Amino acid sequence: MPGSPPQPLPLREEPAAVLLVDLPAGAGRPAGVAAADAAALRRAAPAGASAAPFADLPAFCRAAGLPAAAAERALAGAVPGELVEDRWWLAVAPLGERRALLSLHEVQEGAAAPAPGAPAAVAGAALTAVPAGPPAGAGEGPDDARGVVEWVGAGWSRVTGVPAGDVVGRGCAGLLPAGDEDEHLALRRAVRSGEPVAVTVLDERTDGTRFLHRVRSTPLRDRTGALCHVVTWHSDVTALVAAAGGPDPLRALAALDSLPGPARTRQAVVAQLGAAARALAGAVVPAAMVVLLDEGRGRAPGPGAEVVAAAGEPFEGLVGRTWRRPPGARGEDPLPGATGPGVLALPLPGHGHVLGWLVVVPGESGPGAAGEAVLRAAARRAGLAVENARLHAREHELSETLQRSMLPEDTAVEGLDVWAFYAPNTEHAQVGGDWYDVLRAPDGGAGVVVGDVVGHDVEAVAAMGQMRSVVRSAAQELDDPGSVLMRVDQLAAGVDVQRMASLVYATLRRLDDGGWEVAWSSAGHLPPLLRRARAGDGPAVEVLNDATGTLVGLGERPRPTRERALHPGDVLVLYTDGLIEARHRPMRDGLEVLVEVLAGTRARDAAGIGEELLQGLGESPEDDTAVVVVRVPEEAEEPARPVADTPRRRRWQLPSEPSSVGKARHATLRACAVWGLAVGPQAEIVVSELVANAVLHGWGPVGLRLFDLPGALRIEVEDDSPEQPRVVDARPDGAGGHGMRVVATLGRWGVTPTRRGKIVWVEVPTS
């Protein structure tokens, strides 16, 4: 039955004789030997013998010292396995009506004889026809001699769990599904050259069970001495290895099985590699470690690689060290600088390049065939895990770059306090189709959009870009939000946006009396929230859940528009589901929490209100999050009045352009005023210098964060460039070089590397 391992028997691995037999066409005629292996030929025609090695089966067996009567009896009854003379295990496999494969294996000396009828240790066999010659015009590459599988026995399916029909008539590489390129190449060369080969690989049956798959080839030659067939023997040696006191492959496999799993970050992969190294060091070899090339050198290996996992002497304590790479393409030379016994380095294969090496101390007797199979499997799985993480990181970086490039560069609206924020799902390394946009109108008003495209991949980001362009185009043509969304439905159908999307579009206009009015319409999106500054105007927070229609492009009904008057101090919040939804909290409950947090906000600026919302609903979103906070300033708000119990942190996202320097300075002065800090001028200088450096010398969006700490104002500026600023001497002409020197005199500073670039921070004393 597929998936059931055969019963191990004490037989010698190398067959004593293998014969391809022609069955007689009529009664009374003996079978003839069509082909035989080298061991049988040596027995039948020893050196100096004059008799021809090929004859009928009885004559051949007598010349070779084999049990002729038992062989004929086995052929007549097609005996699958029989103990003969307490010495031989004889097995016959019919190959159609005219041929059969006869094999004899010797019982190991001193071992108990197998029970009658028990399956042999070499439980599976396959017969491969050797091609007459290489393909026309071919060289000596690995594809020159694939061979064609003519037959596989029931034992082969029992060992591997693969039906015979999946491999018969196909290339011989299919007999070794789990093998790597070196092992497949060895098998194909054996088919071509007739040299025997023996390999052990870590394999997996169709039912998911893992086992050590031992494959040994036996070439057969015909009457002319030409190679005509190759027999491969297949066995599950997992139990035999364990019984012999060898490596425990199942223990190592428990750690290896997790390597190609869902790990998507380098940290997660390193943790898995560490577990695998510990398992290998305890079960297969005395010591193991994994060294990785960084991604930048992956396709052209540089002179060094970082040790990311190590277990066992002499590798303990080497994590984080740099090692020179092993010479040679196969990476199997001793690693320079290693100490102790001989060291073996197996490459971690990527897509056409080496990602690093699995470095092991094989011990005095070596890892053995089974241990080597486990090590090769470990290297393959480690390479797959690292490659998957790197591919996912590159896709995530591309998606995030595309998404950030589509966010608006300027959200300022004259007469309004506007704060916008976007946070990717960094914990789960995913980027989706959330976005926001702020469109300034010619009459001094503005349009605000918050939307969400289904999905978390590059296609979702591309669809988001299409939707953003469609909304901008419709907003240029029409004023009424409901009419804008109806036009969006038409345009989205015209450009064939492939993903479903929701969005809410709101316009803010200044009225003749100096007040403001908001009008909105929603296409299946979460409702905006309106917090009133005066309790007499109604509930503290109103959920604007009317004017809601279907998702973009679904249905042709008119989309409604609703309006509300806005008063000084009123706050409008638009958001995506990443702000309120979590695995432990349904969306409805999250909306109630958001309403409660918004009602209790005490900050007097849009950035502070947004900060309170982010803190109240979690700093690690499980989905992308986009938030826009619009606040109508109060007349008596200048200069800003300090409020002691507002959040003591602020954050902004700024475009990489010169105008961001002025915006950052204004935001910093306002925050210092709200917090009642007297270091506004010093902070303004620091922020001006750091943001200017990020714009001039870095790339990507600029992040500005302020923290009011005990005794200090901490300023952080983030960009995507890893290049760090330095304090340098001022230029003689006075044209530059003063910036960081001045910053260093105003407070303690430093640089923190990030996944994408760096954070430059300065702590300005406040007391």
Image (cartoon, rainbow, N blue to C red):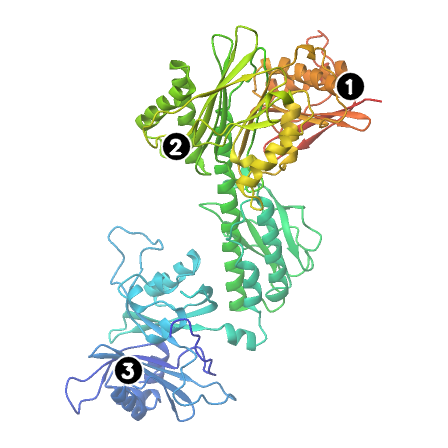
Neighbourhood count class around disc 3 (C-alpha, 10 Å): few under 14, some 14–19, many 20 upward: many
Q: Position of residue 310 (x, y in %)?
A: 65, 54
Q: Are marks 1 and 2 in contact (CB under 8 Å)?
A: no
Mark 3 or 2, which is nearer the eye?
2
Real-space Cα separation, disc 3 to disc 1, in angstroms: 105 Å
Real-space Cα separation, disc 3 to disc 2, in angstroms: 86 Å
| Residue where numbered disc 3 is placed | 53
In which quadrant of the rendered image does the C terminus lie? top right
Query: In this orientation, which residue lies closer to the viewer: 281 or 560?
Result: 560
| Precedes in sequence: disc 3 or disc 2 | 3
Q: Secondary structure at mark 3?
A: loop
Query: Residue 47, which numbered label?
Result: none
Amino acid type assigned to the residue bearing label 3 in the image: Pro
Query: In this orientation, which residue lies closer to the viewer: 119 or 763?
Result: 763
Q: Which quadrant of the structure image shows residue 502? A: top left
Neighbourhood count class around disc 1 (C-alpha, 10 Å): few under 14, some 14–19, many 20 upward: some
| Residue where numbered disc 1 is placed | 676
Q: Position of residue 76 (x, y in %)?
A: 25, 88
Q: Secondary structure at mark 1?
A: loop
| Residue where numbered disc 2 is placed | 550
**In this picture, residue 658 sits left or right of residue 752:** left
Real-space Cα separation, disc 1 to disc 2, in angstroms: 47 Å
Q: Tell me what residue is drawn at x 53 percent, y 19 percent.
A: 409
**In this picture, residue 314 sits left or right of residue 433:** right
**In this picture, residue 501 sits left or right of residue 358:** left
